Amino acid sequence: MEKEITLEFEQPSFFKRIKGMLSVDFYRLFHTPLFYIFLFIAAIIPALVSMGSMGDTNETAGMFTNAWQIIAADKPLYVISNIGEYANMNMVFIFGGIMISIFIGHDYHSGYVKQLFTTHSTKQDYMMSKTIISAFSMMCMCITYLIGGTLSGAFTGLPFTINVGSLILAILGKMIMSLGWASLYTFINIIFRRKFGISIALCFVFGTGIPVIGAASIVGNSSILNIFLYGSSVNACLSSNIISLITCLGISLVWAVIYNIVGTLVLSKRDCY
Amino acid sequence: MNAIEIRNLTKNYGEKQALSNLNMTVPMGAIYGFIGENGSGKSTTEKLICGLIRPNSGTIKLFDKDYHDQEIRSQIGVLIESPGCFPNISVWDNMKIQAANLGIKNENEEIRRVLKIVRMEGSASNKFKNCSLGMKQRIGIAFALLGNPKLLILDEPINGLDADGMRIMREVLIDITKNLSCTVLISSHILGELEKIATHYGIIRNGKMIKEMTAEELEKECPTYVAIKAKDNIEAKRALEKRYKKVIEENDELRVYDSCLTKDVVSYLYSENILPTYVQTKKINLEEYYINLMDKGGTL
Protein backbone atom coordinates (compact mmCIF):
# COMPACT_ATOMS: atom_id res chain seq x y z
CA MET A 1 0.00 0.00 0.00
CA GLU A 2 1.30 3.45 -0.88
CA LYS A 3 2.29 5.49 2.13
CA GLU A 4 0.52 8.85 2.40
CA ILE A 5 3.05 11.68 2.69
CA THR A 6 2.11 14.58 4.92
CA LEU A 7 3.87 17.86 4.32
CA GLU A 8 4.20 20.46 7.02
CA PHE A 9 4.61 24.13 6.23
CA GLU A 10 5.49 27.03 8.46
CA GLN A 11 3.15 30.05 8.55
CA PRO A 12 5.36 33.13 8.12
CA SER A 13 4.23 35.85 10.54
CA PHE A 14 3.48 39.41 9.42
CA PHE A 15 6.60 40.70 11.18
CA LYS A 16 8.77 38.05 9.60
CA ARG A 17 7.42 38.88 6.15
CA ILE A 18 7.70 42.66 6.50
CA LYS A 19 11.15 42.35 8.06
CA GLY A 20 12.33 40.28 5.10
CA MET A 21 10.86 42.68 2.56
CA LEU A 22 12.14 45.79 4.31
CA SER A 23 15.63 44.34 4.66
CA VAL A 24 15.62 43.73 0.90
CA ASP A 25 14.34 47.23 0.13
CA PHE A 26 16.89 48.89 2.42
CA TYR A 27 19.62 46.74 0.93
CA ARG A 28 18.55 47.79 -2.56
CA LEU A 29 18.24 51.44 -1.57
CA PHE A 30 21.74 51.60 -0.12
CA HIS A 31 23.18 49.75 -3.11
CA THR A 32 21.60 51.86 -5.83
CA PRO A 33 23.39 54.99 -7.09
CA LEU A 34 19.94 56.48 -7.65
CA PHE A 35 19.51 57.11 -3.91
CA TYR A 36 22.82 58.96 -3.58
CA ILE A 37 22.17 60.96 -6.75
CA PHE A 38 18.86 62.18 -5.34
CA LEU A 39 20.43 62.95 -1.95
CA PHE A 40 22.96 65.06 -3.82
CA ILE A 41 20.21 66.72 -5.86
CA ALA A 42 18.33 67.52 -2.63
CA ALA A 43 21.51 69.10 -1.24
CA ILE A 44 22.24 71.15 -4.31
CA ILE A 45 18.72 72.50 -4.90
CA PRO A 46 18.93 75.09 -2.07
CA ALA A 47 22.26 76.25 -3.44
CA LEU A 48 20.71 76.75 -6.87
CA VAL A 49 17.69 78.48 -5.35
CA SER A 50 19.79 80.86 -3.23
CA MET A 51 22.07 81.59 -6.18
CA GLY A 52 18.91 82.52 -8.08
CA SER A 53 17.95 84.89 -5.28
CA MET A 54 21.24 86.70 -5.78
CA GLY A 55 20.32 87.46 -9.36
CA ASP A 56 19.36 90.92 -10.46
CA THR A 57 16.14 90.17 -12.34
CA ASN A 58 12.84 91.33 -10.91
CA GLU A 59 11.61 87.74 -10.33
CA THR A 60 14.59 86.51 -8.42
CA ALA A 61 16.19 89.48 -6.72
CA GLY A 62 15.67 89.56 -2.97
CA MET A 63 13.63 86.34 -2.86
CA PHE A 64 14.89 85.59 0.61
CA THR A 65 15.48 87.94 3.54
CA ASN A 66 16.43 85.13 5.92
CA ALA A 67 18.54 82.00 5.36
CA TRP A 68 15.85 79.72 6.85
CA GLN A 69 13.34 80.78 4.21
CA ILE A 70 15.23 78.39 1.92
CA ILE A 71 13.98 75.65 4.26
CA ALA A 72 10.40 76.82 4.84
CA ALA A 73 8.22 79.83 4.07
CA ASP A 74 7.48 82.39 6.83
CA LYS A 75 3.74 81.75 6.70
CA PRO A 76 1.52 79.03 5.18
CA LEU A 77 0.99 80.53 1.74
CA TYR A 78 -0.99 78.38 -0.69
CA VAL A 79 -1.47 81.23 -3.14
CA ILE A 80 2.06 82.10 -4.14
CA SER A 81 3.13 85.40 -5.57
CA ASN A 82 6.80 84.72 -6.22
CA ILE A 83 9.14 81.79 -6.52
CA GLY A 84 10.69 82.57 -3.13
CA GLU A 85 7.42 81.62 -1.41
CA TYR A 86 7.44 78.33 -3.25
CA ALA A 87 11.10 77.30 -3.33
CA ASN A 88 11.76 75.52 -0.05
CA MET A 89 12.10 72.04 1.41
CA ASN A 90 8.76 71.05 -0.19
CA MET A 91 10.72 70.61 -3.41
CA VAL A 92 12.13 67.43 -1.90
CA PHE A 93 8.70 65.89 -2.43
CA ILE A 94 8.91 66.57 -6.17
CA PHE A 95 12.26 64.86 -6.58
CA GLY A 96 11.30 62.20 -4.05
CA GLY A 97 8.33 61.28 -6.25
CA ILE A 98 10.56 60.84 -9.28
CA MET A 99 12.99 58.71 -7.30
CA ILE A 100 10.21 56.49 -5.96
CA SER A 101 8.77 56.05 -9.46
CA ILE A 102 12.14 54.85 -10.71
CA PHE A 103 12.62 52.61 -7.67
CA ILE A 104 9.21 50.93 -7.92
CA GLY A 105 9.31 50.90 -11.74
CA HIS A 106 12.49 48.86 -11.43
CA ASP A 107 10.60 46.24 -9.40
CA TYR A 108 8.34 45.60 -12.37
CA HIS A 109 10.93 46.08 -15.10
CA SER A 110 13.32 43.54 -13.56
CA GLY A 111 10.59 41.03 -12.78
CA TYR A 112 11.35 41.27 -9.06
CA VAL A 113 7.63 41.58 -8.19
CA LYS A 114 7.01 38.33 -9.99
CA GLN A 115 9.52 36.66 -7.69
CA LEU A 116 8.08 38.47 -4.70
CA PHE A 117 4.37 37.81 -5.15
CA THR A 118 4.94 34.15 -5.87
CA THR A 119 6.30 33.68 -2.37
CA HIS A 120 4.41 34.35 0.85
CA SER A 121 4.65 38.14 0.47
CA THR A 122 1.24 39.79 0.46
CA LYS A 123 0.14 42.85 -1.47
CA GLN A 124 -0.26 44.71 1.81
CA ASP A 125 3.33 43.86 2.76
CA TYR A 126 4.45 45.28 -0.57
CA MET A 127 2.53 48.54 -0.15
CA MET A 128 3.78 49.00 3.39
CA SER A 129 7.37 48.19 2.59
CA LYS A 130 7.46 50.58 -0.38
CA THR A 131 5.80 53.33 1.65
CA ILE A 132 8.29 52.97 4.49
CA ILE A 133 11.33 52.84 2.22
CA SER A 134 10.08 55.80 0.19
CA ALA A 135 9.34 57.82 3.34
CA PHE A 136 12.80 57.01 4.65
CA SER A 137 14.49 58.12 1.43
CA MET A 138 12.54 61.42 1.39
CA MET A 139 13.41 62.04 5.04
CA CYS A 140 17.07 61.54 4.14
CA MET A 141 16.59 63.98 1.28
CA CYS A 142 15.08 66.47 3.76
CA ILE A 143 18.24 66.18 5.86
CA THR A 144 20.60 66.74 2.91
CA TYR A 145 18.36 69.62 1.81
CA LEU A 146 18.69 71.11 5.31
CA ILE A 147 22.48 70.80 5.17
CA GLY A 148 22.59 72.25 1.65
CA GLY A 149 20.20 75.04 2.66
CA THR A 150 22.22 75.98 5.74
CA LEU A 151 25.49 76.04 3.79
CA SER A 152 24.06 78.06 0.92
CA GLY A 153 22.43 80.46 3.43
CA ALA A 154 25.83 80.99 4.99
CA PHE A 155 27.44 81.37 1.58
CA THR A 156 24.97 84.04 0.45
CA GLY A 157 25.39 85.91 3.74
CA LEU A 158 21.71 85.92 4.68
CA PRO A 159 20.82 86.39 8.35
CA PHE A 160 20.05 83.25 10.43
CA THR A 161 17.85 84.90 13.06
CA ILE A 162 14.91 82.63 13.83
CA ASN A 163 12.67 81.17 16.52
CA VAL A 164 14.52 77.85 16.86
CA GLY A 165 11.44 76.01 18.18
CA SER A 166 9.35 76.93 15.14
CA LEU A 167 12.20 76.02 12.80
CA ILE A 168 12.54 72.57 14.40
CA LEU A 169 8.77 72.05 14.25
CA ALA A 170 8.73 73.09 10.58
CA ILE A 171 11.54 70.69 9.68
CA LEU A 172 9.96 67.88 11.71
CA GLY A 173 6.59 68.63 10.09
CA LYS A 174 8.03 68.35 6.60
CA MET A 175 9.85 65.14 7.47
CA ILE A 176 6.65 63.67 8.91
CA MET A 177 4.83 64.60 5.69
CA SER A 178 7.26 62.31 3.86
CA LEU A 179 5.17 59.36 5.02
CA GLY A 180 1.99 60.70 3.40
CA TRP A 181 3.82 61.65 0.21
CA ALA A 182 5.50 58.25 0.09
CA SER A 183 2.14 56.48 0.31
CA LEU A 184 0.70 58.68 -2.46
CA TYR A 185 3.64 57.99 -4.76
CA THR A 186 3.55 54.28 -3.99
CA PHE A 187 -0.16 54.26 -4.78
CA ILE A 188 0.36 56.11 -8.09
CA ASN A 189 3.07 53.67 -9.08
CA ILE A 190 0.85 50.70 -8.21
CA ILE A 191 -1.99 52.06 -10.35
CA PHE A 192 0.25 52.82 -13.32
CA ARG A 193 2.75 50.06 -12.68
CA ARG A 194 3.25 49.28 -16.35
CA LYS A 195 3.14 52.90 -17.48
CA PHE A 196 6.31 54.35 -16.09
CA GLY A 197 5.99 57.70 -17.89
CA ILE A 198 2.51 58.36 -16.50
CA SER A 199 3.68 57.48 -12.98
CA ILE A 200 6.55 59.96 -13.13
CA ALA A 201 4.38 62.68 -14.66
CA LEU A 202 1.68 62.25 -11.99
CA CYS A 203 4.23 62.20 -9.18
CA PHE A 204 5.63 65.44 -10.57
CA VAL A 205 2.18 67.06 -10.84
CA PHE A 206 1.20 66.12 -7.28
CA GLY A 207 4.65 66.88 -5.87
CA THR A 208 4.68 70.38 -7.30
CA GLY A 209 1.34 70.95 -5.58
CA ILE A 210 -0.31 72.12 -8.78
CA PRO A 211 -3.78 70.75 -7.79
CA VAL A 212 -3.64 72.49 -4.37
CA ILE A 213 -2.21 75.72 -5.79
CA GLY A 214 -5.01 75.59 -8.36
CA ALA A 215 -7.59 75.07 -5.61
CA ALA A 216 -6.02 77.92 -3.63
CA SER A 217 -6.54 80.25 -6.55
CA ILE A 218 -10.28 79.53 -6.15
CA VAL A 219 -10.77 79.23 -2.37
CA GLY A 220 -7.98 81.62 -1.43
CA ASN A 221 -5.39 81.17 1.28
CA SER A 222 -7.65 78.88 3.32
CA SER A 223 -6.46 76.50 6.04
CA ILE A 224 -8.96 73.93 4.69
CA LEU A 225 -6.23 73.10 2.17
CA ASN A 226 -4.25 71.59 5.04
CA ILE A 227 -6.23 68.38 4.61
CA PHE A 228 -4.16 67.73 1.50
CA LEU A 229 -0.57 66.56 1.60
CA TYR A 230 0.74 69.65 -0.16
CA GLY A 231 -1.35 71.92 2.07
CA SER A 232 0.00 70.36 5.25
CA SER A 233 3.53 70.47 3.87
CA VAL A 234 3.11 74.22 3.28
CA ASN A 235 1.59 74.57 6.76
CA ALA A 236 4.88 73.33 8.23
CA CYS A 237 6.41 76.80 8.02
CA LEU A 238 8.66 79.08 10.06
CA SER A 239 5.68 80.17 12.15
CA SER A 240 4.81 76.55 13.03
CA ASN A 241 3.58 75.58 16.45
CA ILE A 242 2.79 72.24 18.01
CA ILE A 243 -0.69 72.29 16.41
CA SER A 244 0.89 72.50 12.97
CA LEU A 245 3.06 69.51 13.80
CA ILE A 246 0.10 67.47 15.08
CA THR A 247 -1.82 68.43 11.92
CA CYS A 248 1.07 67.23 9.78
CA LEU A 249 1.24 63.98 11.73
CA GLY A 250 -2.51 63.38 11.52
CA ILE A 251 -2.84 64.25 7.83
CA SER A 252 0.23 62.26 6.88
CA LEU A 253 -0.97 59.20 8.79
CA VAL A 254 -4.54 59.38 7.51
CA TRP A 255 -3.45 59.65 3.87
CA ALA A 256 -0.86 56.91 4.38
CA VAL A 257 -3.55 54.57 5.71
CA ILE A 258 -6.01 55.49 2.93
CA TYR A 259 -3.49 55.05 0.13
CA ASN A 260 -2.20 51.80 1.62
CA ILE A 261 -5.67 50.30 1.93
CA VAL A 262 -6.76 51.37 -1.56
CA GLY A 263 -3.40 50.35 -3.05
CA THR A 264 -3.62 46.92 -1.44
CA LEU A 265 -7.16 46.49 -2.77
CA VAL A 266 -6.09 47.49 -6.26
CA LEU A 267 -3.17 45.06 -6.19
CA SER A 268 -5.38 42.27 -4.86
CA LYS A 269 -8.18 42.74 -7.36
CA ARG A 270 -6.08 43.06 -10.46
CA ASP A 271 -3.37 41.06 -12.17
CA CYS A 272 -0.16 42.14 -10.48
CA TYR A 273 2.28 41.06 -13.18
CA MET B 1 -2.54 14.21 -2.10
CA ASN B 2 -2.07 16.18 -5.31
CA ALA B 3 0.49 18.95 -5.46
CA ILE B 4 -1.65 20.93 -7.92
CA GLU B 5 -5.33 20.47 -8.56
CA ILE B 6 -7.02 22.84 -10.97
CA ARG B 7 -10.71 22.70 -11.75
CA ASN B 8 -12.61 24.63 -14.42
CA LEU B 9 -10.09 27.42 -14.58
CA THR B 10 -10.96 30.26 -16.92
CA LYS B 11 -8.92 33.35 -17.61
CA ASN B 12 -9.76 36.15 -20.01
CA TYR B 13 -7.53 39.00 -21.07
CA GLY B 14 -10.12 41.53 -22.10
CA GLU B 15 -12.14 39.81 -24.80
CA LYS B 16 -9.52 37.15 -25.47
CA GLN B 17 -10.03 33.88 -23.65
CA ALA B 18 -6.65 32.52 -22.58
CA LEU B 19 -7.93 29.54 -20.58
CA SER B 20 -11.26 27.84 -20.86
CA ASN B 21 -12.43 25.49 -18.08
CA LEU B 22 -8.98 24.03 -17.69
CA ASN B 23 -8.59 20.98 -15.47
CA MET B 24 -5.20 19.79 -14.34
CA THR B 25 -3.93 17.33 -11.77
CA VAL B 26 -0.29 17.15 -10.79
CA PRO B 27 0.37 14.34 -8.31
CA MET B 28 2.85 14.91 -5.52
CA GLY B 29 6.39 13.95 -6.42
CA ALA B 30 5.71 14.09 -10.15
CA ILE B 31 7.73 15.80 -12.84
CA TYR B 32 4.85 17.12 -14.90
CA GLY B 33 5.71 18.03 -18.46
CA PHE B 34 3.37 20.79 -19.58
CA ILE B 35 3.23 20.91 -23.36
CA GLY B 36 1.50 23.15 -25.82
CA GLU B 37 1.97 25.50 -28.73
CA ASN B 38 2.98 29.12 -28.25
CA GLY B 39 -0.01 31.04 -26.90
CA SER B 40 -1.84 27.88 -25.86
CA GLY B 41 -2.08 29.02 -22.23
CA LYS B 42 0.90 27.39 -20.50
CA SER B 43 2.41 30.56 -19.09
CA THR B 44 -1.03 31.88 -18.14
CA THR B 45 -1.72 28.68 -16.19
CA GLU B 46 1.65 28.95 -14.45
CA LYS B 47 1.13 32.61 -13.60
CA LEU B 48 -2.28 31.76 -12.17
CA ILE B 49 -0.80 29.03 -9.99
CA CYS B 50 1.84 31.50 -8.81
CA GLY B 51 -0.85 34.05 -7.92
CA LEU B 52 0.55 36.65 -10.32
CA ILE B 53 -2.72 36.98 -12.20
CA ARG B 54 -6.31 36.43 -11.12
CA PRO B 55 -8.62 33.84 -12.65
CA ASN B 56 -12.09 34.73 -13.90
CA SER B 57 -13.45 31.49 -12.51
CA GLY B 58 -12.36 28.09 -11.28
CA THR B 59 -10.32 26.77 -8.38
CA ILE B 60 -6.64 26.14 -7.79
CA LYS B 61 -5.50 23.99 -4.90
CA LEU B 62 -1.92 23.41 -3.92
CA PHE B 63 -1.33 20.46 -1.59
CA ASP B 64 -5.08 20.38 -0.85
CA LYS B 65 -5.11 24.01 0.29
CA ASP B 66 -6.23 27.18 -1.44
CA TYR B 67 -3.40 28.53 -3.57
CA HIS B 68 -3.42 31.86 -1.68
CA ASP B 69 -2.41 30.10 1.53
CA GLN B 70 0.80 31.76 2.73
CA GLU B 71 2.20 28.58 4.24
CA ILE B 72 2.05 26.96 0.82
CA ARG B 73 3.31 29.99 -1.07
CA SER B 74 6.55 30.04 0.89
CA GLN B 75 7.23 26.55 -0.48
CA ILE B 76 7.05 27.42 -4.17
CA GLY B 77 10.10 27.94 -6.34
CA VAL B 78 9.48 29.66 -9.64
CA LEU B 79 11.19 30.41 -12.90
CA ILE B 80 8.72 32.09 -15.23
CA GLU B 81 10.06 33.65 -18.43
CA SER B 82 13.24 34.98 -16.80
CA PRO B 83 14.58 35.24 -13.25
CA GLY B 84 13.46 38.43 -11.51
CA CYS B 85 16.94 39.77 -10.94
CA PHE B 86 18.23 43.32 -10.73
CA PRO B 87 20.65 43.74 -13.65
CA ASN B 88 23.11 46.10 -12.02
CA ILE B 89 23.90 44.05 -8.95
CA SER B 90 25.83 40.83 -8.63
CA VAL B 91 24.40 37.34 -8.90
CA TRP B 92 25.29 36.80 -5.23
CA ASP B 93 23.47 39.95 -4.11
CA ASN B 94 20.43 39.03 -6.18
CA MET B 95 20.40 35.64 -4.48
CA LYS B 96 20.71 37.34 -1.09
CA ILE B 97 17.67 39.47 -1.89
CA GLN B 98 15.57 36.44 -2.76
CA ALA B 99 16.85 34.55 0.30
CA ALA B 100 15.83 37.47 2.51
CA ASN B 101 12.36 37.53 0.92
CA LEU B 102 12.01 33.84 1.65
CA GLY B 103 13.16 34.36 5.23
CA ILE B 104 16.11 31.98 4.91
CA LYS B 105 18.32 32.35 7.96
CA ASN B 106 21.58 30.70 6.88
CA GLU B 107 21.40 32.41 3.52
CA ASN B 108 25.13 32.34 2.64
CA GLU B 109 25.25 28.58 3.07
CA GLU B 110 22.02 28.12 1.12
CA ILE B 111 23.13 30.37 -1.74
CA ARG B 112 26.43 28.50 -2.00
CA ARG B 113 24.49 25.19 -2.08
CA VAL B 114 22.17 26.18 -4.94
CA LEU B 115 24.90 27.91 -6.93
CA LYS B 116 26.97 24.75 -6.64
CA ILE B 117 24.07 22.68 -7.94
CA VAL B 118 23.85 24.78 -11.11
CA ARG B 119 27.64 25.13 -11.29
CA MET B 120 27.65 28.88 -10.99
CA GLU B 121 29.84 29.25 -7.88
CA GLY B 122 32.57 30.90 -9.95
CA SER B 123 30.25 33.53 -11.39
CA ALA B 124 28.59 34.70 -8.18
CA SER B 125 30.39 38.04 -8.20
CA ASN B 126 29.40 38.83 -11.82
CA LYS B 127 26.79 41.48 -12.38
CA PHE B 128 23.58 39.83 -13.56
CA LYS B 129 23.46 41.95 -16.72
CA ASN B 130 26.87 40.62 -17.76
CA CYS B 131 25.75 36.97 -17.64
CA SER B 132 25.01 35.06 -20.84
CA LEU B 133 21.51 33.72 -21.58
CA GLY B 134 22.49 30.23 -20.45
CA MET B 135 24.02 31.58 -17.25
CA LYS B 136 20.88 33.59 -16.55
CA GLN B 137 18.76 30.46 -16.96
CA ARG B 138 21.00 28.60 -14.51
CA ILE B 139 20.72 31.48 -12.06
CA GLY B 140 16.96 31.35 -12.50
CA ILE B 141 16.98 27.69 -11.62
CA ALA B 142 19.18 28.40 -8.58
CA PHE B 143 16.68 31.10 -7.58
CA ALA B 144 13.84 28.62 -7.81
CA LEU B 145 15.75 26.05 -5.76
CA LEU B 146 16.44 28.43 -2.86
CA GLY B 147 14.97 27.14 0.38
CA ASN B 148 14.24 23.61 -0.87
CA PRO B 149 10.76 24.32 -2.26
CA LYS B 150 8.13 21.59 -2.29
CA LEU B 151 6.79 22.76 -5.63
CA LEU B 152 8.86 23.99 -8.55
CA ILE B 153 7.22 25.80 -11.44
CA LEU B 154 9.54 26.17 -14.39
CA ASP B 155 8.54 27.90 -17.59
CA GLU B 156 10.84 27.02 -20.47
CA PRO B 157 13.85 26.53 -18.17
CA ILE B 158 15.88 24.62 -20.76
CA ASN B 159 15.85 27.43 -23.33
CA GLY B 160 19.32 28.79 -23.82
CA LEU B 161 21.01 26.02 -21.87
CA ASP B 162 23.97 24.18 -23.40
CA ALA B 163 24.23 20.38 -23.35
CA ASP B 164 25.92 20.44 -19.95
CA GLY B 165 23.28 22.79 -18.59
CA MET B 166 20.52 20.49 -19.78
CA ARG B 167 22.20 17.49 -18.19
CA ILE B 168 22.56 19.35 -14.88
CA MET B 169 18.94 20.35 -15.08
CA ARG B 170 17.89 16.73 -15.62
CA GLU B 171 19.97 15.52 -12.71
CA VAL B 172 18.74 18.24 -10.39
CA LEU B 173 15.07 17.66 -11.17
CA ILE B 174 15.29 13.90 -10.81
CA ASP B 175 17.25 14.30 -7.57
CA ILE B 176 14.89 16.75 -5.89
CA THR B 177 11.79 14.79 -6.78
CA LYS B 178 13.28 11.52 -5.55
CA ASN B 179 15.11 12.72 -2.46
CA LEU B 180 13.36 15.91 -1.36
CA SER B 181 9.75 14.98 -2.20
CA CYS B 182 9.54 17.99 -4.48
CA THR B 183 6.98 18.23 -7.29
CA VAL B 184 7.95 19.87 -10.57
CA LEU B 185 5.73 21.50 -13.16
CA ILE B 186 7.85 22.15 -16.22
CA SER B 187 6.84 23.55 -19.58
CA SER B 188 9.12 23.22 -22.54
CA HIS B 189 9.16 23.01 -26.30
CA ILE B 190 12.24 20.79 -26.19
CA LEU B 191 10.19 17.61 -25.99
CA GLY B 192 13.14 15.24 -26.42
CA GLU B 193 14.62 16.59 -23.20
CA LEU B 194 11.30 16.59 -21.41
CA GLU B 195 10.70 12.96 -22.32
CA LYS B 196 13.85 11.96 -20.43
CA ILE B 197 12.57 13.23 -17.09
CA ALA B 198 8.79 13.65 -17.05
CA THR B 199 6.65 11.20 -15.12
CA HIS B 200 3.40 12.85 -16.17
CA TYR B 201 2.29 14.94 -19.12
CA GLY B 202 -0.38 17.52 -19.75
CA ILE B 203 -1.05 18.75 -23.28
CA ILE B 204 -2.84 22.06 -23.64
CA ARG B 205 -4.35 23.59 -26.73
CA ASN B 206 -6.26 26.85 -27.12
CA GLY B 207 -6.59 27.16 -23.36
CA LYS B 208 -8.00 23.66 -22.87
CA MET B 209 -6.31 20.59 -21.48
CA ILE B 210 -6.67 18.05 -24.25
CA LYS B 211 -4.71 15.21 -22.69
CA GLU B 212 -3.26 14.27 -19.32
CA MET B 213 -1.37 11.03 -18.90
CA THR B 214 1.46 9.32 -17.11
CA ALA B 215 4.74 8.41 -18.77
CA GLU B 216 3.60 4.76 -18.69
CA GLU B 217 0.39 5.62 -20.49
CA LEU B 218 2.37 7.56 -23.08
CA GLU B 219 4.61 4.54 -23.51
CA LYS B 220 1.54 2.41 -24.26
CA GLU B 221 0.15 4.98 -26.66
CA CYS B 222 3.41 5.27 -28.55
CA PRO B 223 3.67 2.14 -30.70
CA THR B 224 6.88 0.57 -31.94
CA TYR B 225 7.30 0.18 -35.66
CA VAL B 226 9.75 -1.24 -38.16
CA ALA B 227 11.35 1.48 -40.28
CA ILE B 228 12.43 0.35 -43.73
CA LYS B 229 14.12 1.97 -46.66
CA ALA B 230 14.37 0.22 -49.99
CA LYS B 231 15.77 1.09 -53.40
CA ASP B 232 12.20 1.44 -54.60
CA ASN B 233 10.02 2.52 -51.71
CA ILE B 234 6.85 2.51 -53.83
CA GLU B 235 7.30 -1.11 -54.79
CA ALA B 236 8.25 -2.02 -51.21
CA LYS B 237 5.18 -0.29 -49.83
CA ARG B 238 2.92 -2.08 -52.30
CA ALA B 239 4.37 -5.41 -51.20
CA LEU B 240 4.20 -4.64 -47.49
CA GLU B 241 0.57 -3.51 -47.73
CA LYS B 242 -0.38 -6.99 -48.99
CA ARG B 243 0.71 -8.47 -45.68
CA TYR B 244 0.58 -5.70 -43.06
CA LYS B 245 -2.42 -3.56 -42.17
CA LYS B 246 -0.72 -0.28 -41.33
CA VAL B 247 2.14 0.83 -43.56
CA ILE B 248 2.89 4.53 -43.72
CA GLU B 249 5.53 6.39 -45.70
CA GLU B 250 7.08 9.20 -43.70
CA ASN B 251 10.42 10.99 -43.90
CA ASP B 252 11.60 8.82 -46.84
CA GLU B 253 11.05 5.64 -44.85
CA LEU B 254 8.32 3.06 -44.70
CA ARG B 255 6.84 2.39 -41.27
CA VAL B 256 5.22 -0.93 -40.52
CA TYR B 257 3.11 -0.47 -37.37
CA ASP B 258 1.67 -3.97 -37.02
CA SER B 259 3.00 -5.93 -34.08
CA CYS B 260 5.73 -7.79 -35.91
CA LEU B 261 9.37 -8.65 -35.61
CA THR B 262 11.95 -6.93 -37.75
CA LYS B 263 13.25 -10.26 -39.09
CA ASP B 264 9.73 -11.22 -40.25
CA VAL B 265 9.43 -8.01 -42.27
CA VAL B 266 12.90 -8.46 -43.76
CA SER B 267 12.23 -12.14 -44.63
CA TYR B 268 8.97 -11.17 -46.26
CA LEU B 269 10.64 -8.45 -48.35
CA TYR B 270 13.33 -10.92 -49.48
CA SER B 271 10.61 -13.38 -50.41
CA GLU B 272 9.11 -10.61 -52.57
CA ASN B 273 12.54 -9.97 -54.18
CA ILE B 274 12.83 -6.54 -52.56
CA LEU B 275 16.15 -5.63 -51.06
CA PRO B 276 15.89 -3.33 -48.02
CA THR B 277 18.72 -0.82 -47.62
CA TYR B 278 17.85 0.16 -44.09
CA VAL B 279 15.89 -1.62 -41.39
CA GLN B 280 15.42 -0.59 -37.77
CA THR B 281 12.89 -1.03 -34.99
CA LYS B 282 11.81 2.37 -33.69
CA LYS B 283 9.31 3.82 -31.28
CA ILE B 284 7.13 6.90 -31.61
CA ASN B 285 8.61 9.50 -29.30
CA LEU B 286 6.90 12.31 -27.41
CA GLU B 287 7.56 14.81 -30.15
CA GLU B 288 5.97 12.65 -32.84
CA TYR B 289 3.11 11.78 -30.52
CA TYR B 290 2.52 15.47 -29.82
CA ILE B 291 2.70 16.44 -33.50
CA ASN B 292 0.25 13.67 -34.42
CA LEU B 293 -2.07 14.80 -31.68
CA MET B 294 -1.94 18.41 -32.85
CA ASP B 295 -2.39 17.39 -36.51
CA LYS B 296 -5.53 15.50 -35.57
CA GLY B 297 -6.97 18.47 -33.74
CA GLY B 298 -6.30 17.13 -30.27
CA THR B 299 -7.56 13.56 -30.59
CA LEU B 300 -5.56 10.55 -31.67
Image (cartoon, rainbow, N blue to C red):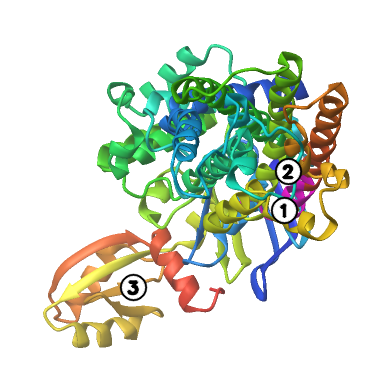
Vertical side of A192 occupied by B163: above or below: above
Left/right placement of residue B132 relative to residue B84 reads: left
Residues marked 2 and 3 touching at CB (< 8 Å): no
Instruction: Kindly identify the amino acid type of the residue bearing the numbered disc 1.
Output: Ile
Query: How much space separates mark 2 and mark 3, taking CA atoms?
Result: 81 Å
For label 3, count other residues whose C-alpha is less than 10 Å away and answer few (under 14), some (14-19) or many (20+): many
User: Could you tell me which chain the residue with mark 3 belongs to?
Assistant: B
- Report which quarter residue B281 is drawn in: bottom left
Is B107 in front, or is B192? B107
Residue A233 colored magenta?
no
Read off the magenta span. A263-273
Residue B106 visible (yes or no): yes
* Mark 2, secondary structure of its residue: helix
Mark 1 and mark 2 on one chain:
yes
Residues marked 3 and 1 touching at CB (< 8 Å): no
Residue B179 visible (yes or no): no
In the picture of the structure, the residue carrying the numbered disc 3 is B256
Q: Nearer the N terminus, badge 1 or badge 2? A: 1
- Report which quarter residue A69 is drawn in: top right
In the picture of the structure, the residue carrying the numbered disc 2 is A230
Mark sitting on residue A213: 1
Residue A268 colored magenta?
yes
Q: Main secondary structure of the magenta part?
A: helix
Is B271 in front, or is B258? B258
**Rendered residue at 42%/49% (across/down):** B194
Instruction: Kindly identify the amino acid type of the residue bearing the numbered disc 3.
Output: Val
Query: How much space separates mark 3 and mark 1, taking CA atoms?
Result: 84 Å
* Mark 1, secondary structure of its residue: helix
Residue A154: image x %, image y %? 49, 19
For label 1, count other residues whose C-alpha is less than 10 Å away and answer few (under 14), some (14-19) or many (20+): many
